[in-house]
C-alpha cells in the first residue's frame, strides 16, 4: 500500500515532469520560429512577447514591462518628467491634443486643444503608436523638438520648435464653488497626490475663511495609481478605523491599513463623486469614506478594479506586473468586478441614462478575476450603516438633468449636473445642521 508521503512525492514528481515537458515544447516552438519564420526575428522580442503572453493570459492587469516601459511607468508614478506639457490621444492616425497643461512649454508656444500633430522633427506620426509618439515628445530638459500641427481654420500647417522642460501634471485641481464649498478633483494617484491634496485644502480654507460649509472630492474618471497614496488620501479624512485590506493567495500575506487621527477637512460634510471611470485607488478611497459614513458617494457605479498588482523588477530586464491580491473595503466588501455603488445615483446626462448603454467595466474584461466574496456567499453582501440624512434631503437630488439642459462643458461648472447636485446636497445639509435646535451629525470615522 502506498503511503501518503510517497503518493504526494509521486504526484509532485509527475507534475514537475509535466512542467519540464511543456518547457521543452516552448523551446521547440522558439527554435522553429527562429529557423523558419518568413523574416529573421529578434530573440529578445520573441521571448518578451512570450512572457507578456503568459502574463496577460492570466488576467487583464498582469503584464511584462520591458526596460523602456518600466522606466515610463516609474516616470508616471513619480509625477514629473521632461517633455512639452500636453495631454494627447490618437485620432485618424494623428496625435490629437486634448489639452495643453498650464504654464508649460507647449502652452507658452501656443499649442491649443484640438490641434492635430502630424509630424515630429519632420517625420510623420502616421504608423506610430501613441506610446511611440509620446516617447519622442518626452526628453531631457533643455532639448528641443520641432512639431508640425494641423489646426482647424488654419490655411496651412503650423510649425513650432519647442524646448522641453520639467513637467509636473496637475493631479490635483481645486476651487471654491460659490465661496462656501471646497471642490477638489484628483485626476490620478501618483507620488504627488497626497501632498498636493493637503496643500489644496489649506489654500481653500484660507480663501473661504469661516464660510466653508462642505467639500466635494471629485474622483470621476480617475483610473487609480499608487496604493500608498490612496491610503494617505483616505487617511486625510478619517480619524480612525480600517481604510482597506488585501487578501492574497496565502492567508499569512493578508494586509490591513488603518487611519491615524487627524481630518484635514475638520469634519466638514463631504460628497465623493464617482463614475464608471473611477477605478482601483479611486475605489479604495470612495469605499473607505462610504463605509465609515464620512462622505456621501454620489454618481454612478464605479469600474470595479479590486485587484492588487505588484511590480517585481527583474534586474537588467524590466519588471513584471503581477496580480497578487484583492482589495476589500473596511466593511469587508470586495471591490473586484462589482465596484462601488453610490449612495445616491445621479447621471451625468439624460441621453446616457435613457439609452441604457452600459459603459465597459472590469467585469466585462476578458479573463477578469471573479468577485471571490460574491462567489462564495452570493447573498451575504455586508450591510452599510444608514446615511441618516435629514428627512427629504436625498429626495431633492435630481437623478437626471432637466430636459433641454446644456451639454456638459468642462470649462462651465454649471453644466456639470452631478457636481451641481452635490453642491445642492451639501448646502442643504449645512443649512439643516446650522438650524437652531438641530444636533450636529457625527461625521468622524467610527
Image (cartoon, grey):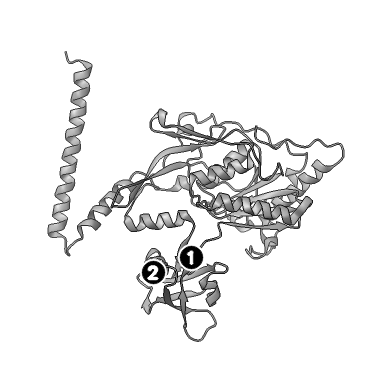
Pick the front one: 367 or 68: 68
Label 1 neighbour load within 10 Å: few <14, some 14-19, many 20+: some
Return the residue found at the far front: 142
Query: Quadrant location of residue 138?
Result: bottom left
Query: Quadrant location of residue 144?
Result: bottom left
Label 2 neighbour load within 10 Å: few <14, some 14-19, many 20+: few
Compared with residue 2, is residue 439 higher up or lower down, i.e. above or below?
Answer: below
On the image, the x and y values in percent for residue 221 come to 55, 54
Gap between marks 2 and 1 measured at Cα: 15 Å
Pick the front one: 4 or 237: 237
Pick the front one: 423 or 213: 213
Report if the CB atoms under discs 2 and 1 are less than 8 Å apart.
Answer: no
Can residue 446 be seen in this snapshot? Answer: yes
Identify the residue position indicated by label 1 in the image: 166
Return the residue found at the far left: 35
In the displayed structure, does residue 372 sit left or right of residue 65? right
Identify the residue position indicated by label 2 in the image: 136
Task: Name the residue rendered at 22%, 22% in the picture.
Answer: 8
Amino acid at each position: 500500500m502506498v503511503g501518503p508521503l510517497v503518493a504526494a512525492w509521486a504526484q509532485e514528481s509527475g507534475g514537475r515532469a509535466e512542467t519540464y515537458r511543456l518547457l521543452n515544447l516552448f523551446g521547440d516552438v522558439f527554435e522553429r520560429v527562429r529557423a523558419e519564420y518568413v523574416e529573421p526575428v529578434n530573440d529578445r522580442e520573441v521571448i518578451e512577447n512570450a512572457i507578456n503572453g503568459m502574463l496577460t493570459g492570466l488576467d487583464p492587469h498582469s503584464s511584462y514591462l520591458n526596460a523602456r516601459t518600466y522606466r515610463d511607468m516609474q516616470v508616471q508614478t513619480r509625477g514629473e518628467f521632461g517633455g512639452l506639457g500636453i495631454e494627447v490621444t490618437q485620432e485618424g492616425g494623428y496625435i490629437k491634443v486634448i489639452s495643453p497643461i498650464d504654464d508649460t512649454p507647449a502652452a507658452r508656444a501656443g499649442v491649443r486643444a484640438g490641434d492635430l500633430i502630424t509630424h515630429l522633427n519632420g517625420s510623420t506620426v502616421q504608423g506610430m503608436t501613441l506610446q511611440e509618439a509620446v516617447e519622442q515628445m518626452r526628453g531631457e530638459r533643455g532639448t528641443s523638438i520641432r512639431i508640425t500641427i494641423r489646426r482647424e481654420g488654419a490655411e496651412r500647417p503650423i510649425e513650432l520648435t519647442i524646448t522641453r522642460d520639467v513637467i509636473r501634471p496637475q493631479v490635483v485641481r481645486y476651487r471654491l464653488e460659490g465661496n462656501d464649498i471646497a471642490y477638489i478633483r484628483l485626476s490620478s494617484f501618483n507620488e504627488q497626490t497626497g501632498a498636493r491634496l493637503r496643500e489644496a485644502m489649506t489654500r481653500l480654507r484660507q480663501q473661504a475663511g469661516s464660510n466653508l460649509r462642505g467639500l466635494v472630492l471629485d474622483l470621476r474618471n480617475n483610473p487609480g495609481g499608487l496604493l500608498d497614496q490612496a491610503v494617505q488620501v483616505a487617511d486625510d479624512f478619517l480619524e480612525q478605523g480600517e481604510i482597506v485590506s488585501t487578501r492574497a493567495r496565502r492567508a499569512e500575506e493578508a494586509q490591513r491599513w488603518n487611519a491615524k487621527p487627524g481630518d484635514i477637512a475638520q469634519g466638514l460634510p463631504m460628497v465623493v463623486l464617482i463614475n464608471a471611470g473611477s477605478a482601483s485607488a479611486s475605489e479604495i478611497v470612495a469605499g473607505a469614506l462610504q463605509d465609515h459614513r464620512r462622505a456621501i458617494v454620489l454618481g454612478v457605479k464605479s469600474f470595479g478594479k479590486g485587484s492588487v498588482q505588484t511590480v517585481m523588477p527583474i534586474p537588467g530586464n524590466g519588471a513584471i506586473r503581477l496580480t497578487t491580491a484583492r482589495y476589500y473595503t473596511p466593511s469587508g466588501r470586495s471591490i473586484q468586478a462589482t465596484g462601488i455603488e453610490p449612495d445616491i445615483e445621479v447621471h451625468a446626462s439624460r441621453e446616457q441614462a435613457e439609452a441604457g448603454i452600459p459603459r465597459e467595466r472590469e467585469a466585462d474584461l476578458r479573463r477578469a478575476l471573479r468577485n471571490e466574496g460574491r462567489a462564495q456567499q452570493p447573498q451575504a453582501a455586508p450591510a452599510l450603516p444608514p446615511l441618516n440624512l435629514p428627512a427629504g434631503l436625498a429626495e431633492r437630488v435630481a437623478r437626471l438633468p432637466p430636459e433641454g439642459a446644456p451639454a456638459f462643458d468642462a470649462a462651465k461648472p454649471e453644466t456639470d449636473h452631478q457636481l451641481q447636485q452635490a453642491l445642492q446636497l451639501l448646502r442643504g445639509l449645512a443649512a439643516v445642521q446650522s438650524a437652531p435646535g438641530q444636533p450636529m451629525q457625527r461625521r468622524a470615522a467610527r
